[in-house]
Amino acid sequence: MSRAGARPGVLAAALLALLPAGPAGAGEAADADAAALSLADLQSDEVAQASDWRSFVEAGAGASVRRGDGAMQGSRRLSVDIRYEHSLAPGARVFLADRLDLGQPAPGVGEHAVNTLKEAYLSWQLAADAMLDLGRINVRNGVAAGYNPTDYFREGAVRAPISINPASLRENRQGSVMLRAQRLWDGGSLTALYSPALVRESNPEGLALDVGATNARHRGLLALSQRVGGLTPQWLVFHEEARSTRFGFNLTGLLNDATVAYLEWSGGRSATQLAEALHALTPACECSAWHNRIAGGLTYTTPDKLSLTAELHHNGAGLESAAWNALRQGPPALYGQYRSALRSSQEMPTRRALFLQAQWQDALLPRLDLGLMHNLDLVDRSRRVWAEARYHVDRVEYAFQWVLHGGEAGSVYGAVPEARGWQLLARYYF
């Protein structure tokens, strides 16, 4: 495809090609990304399955130690998360997911109250094997746990990063306004979607819908999945206005009864992340090159519900050691602009990283879940360790979270203002 904007006519034709001529049917396809949700998110699905509402209120308090002077800073947060799903008529359903976060310090950019409209869309079941959706939808692609190169709709989607858990970042973000069509068959599916440019500038105001953060450019996606033996591959083609087409591939497979292997790849022509962050890339720029982004790993699950994950990450558009060190030692304004751009795109600053994760359900005693994550940047050797203990009692969850950031000044994790911190959480489902 050319570097021009996405063509609505071509994408609309692809959408219409997926729609059947048969009568309406019942049922709905399961979300392919449900396995990526955290243990806490899984618990929320278990609480009120019979009701149209799945909601909770969460209160948290904690403290962090500031890097450098060692000063202690307290924090507190109150969040209300509402999910609503209702059948309007046979074959027609409405979906709504919204989250309000109130915090000190501010969970958003200078805003102490941040509302995130995660999803709001209508879904039509046109036949047993076909659906059409219209509205704001949180599309989450990718099979990896810590880094998802094919998660093309993540840019600008996170308004209030209340957790560093990658599963939470994928779940608690705003969707994009789009038209989506899906066709299903035994062992496979085809998805086509078109997300138009509606507002060119983002609105950081806490209670704004902020459509400009997700719908500033025309975007289109085609995704084909087909189970082949014991493997589940998926192919993706993504195009965004004024940028080159990107291609993606996801693959999962069982190595044995306890081990799952997976691979996620995305490739396409672009400038480096540094050039894009410093606004050096234009539609006529000749400085682009092919860049690959890859995440691959293994997950091993024991009979007592302990899951261990090891994952390698590669970002071909990120910075190698020499360029990364030069940026860290150069003008602070350029370094700050680069890091700010990557917070929005949720990309890796450097070229390589390692991600380790352990999740243990019913650990030591029933209804106690333990989690541990370790991020290691393989370019500057900085690191982050995050741990959580979460206990479930009927409609209430209690959690304790702890985090440590280590590394040299200006490194990936050494630049985080908080050296370490902790928080206590209480969540009530209603």
Image: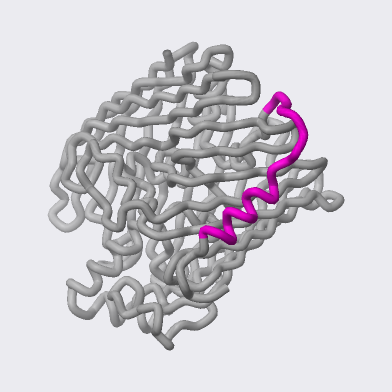
Residue found at the far bottom of this picture: 286
Q: How is the image coloured?
A: one colour
The residue located at (62%, 44%) in the rendering is 181
Where's residue 417, x and y in %? 22, 54
Magenta stretch encompasses residue 266: no
Front residue of 132/236: it is: 132
Please state the horizontal and vertical placement of residue 210, each as a whole percent of the image. 29, 45
Residue at 34% across, 57% down: 344
- In the picture, which quadrant includes the N terminus? bottom right
Q: In the displayed structure, does residue 114 sit left or right of residue 154?
A: left
Which quarter of the figure has residue 73? Answer: top left
**The image quarter in which residue 36 lies:** top right
Say if the magenta span includes residue 14.
yes
Q: Can residue 202 be seen in this view?
A: yes
All told, the count of numbered labels is: 0
Q: Is residue 116 left or right of residue 372?
A: left
Q: Position of residue 283 (x, y in %)?
A: 40, 78
Residue located at (50% from left, 83% from top)? 289
Q: Which of 60 and 159 is in front in this view?
A: 159
Look at 49% across and 11% down and name the residue there. Answer: 394
Residue 272 location (% of width, % of height): 41, 77
**Can the viewer see residue 255 in this picture?**
no
* Position above or below: 200 against 400: below
Quadrant in the picture for the C terminus: top left
Magenta part of the protein: which range?
8-27
Left or right of 281, for residue 225: right
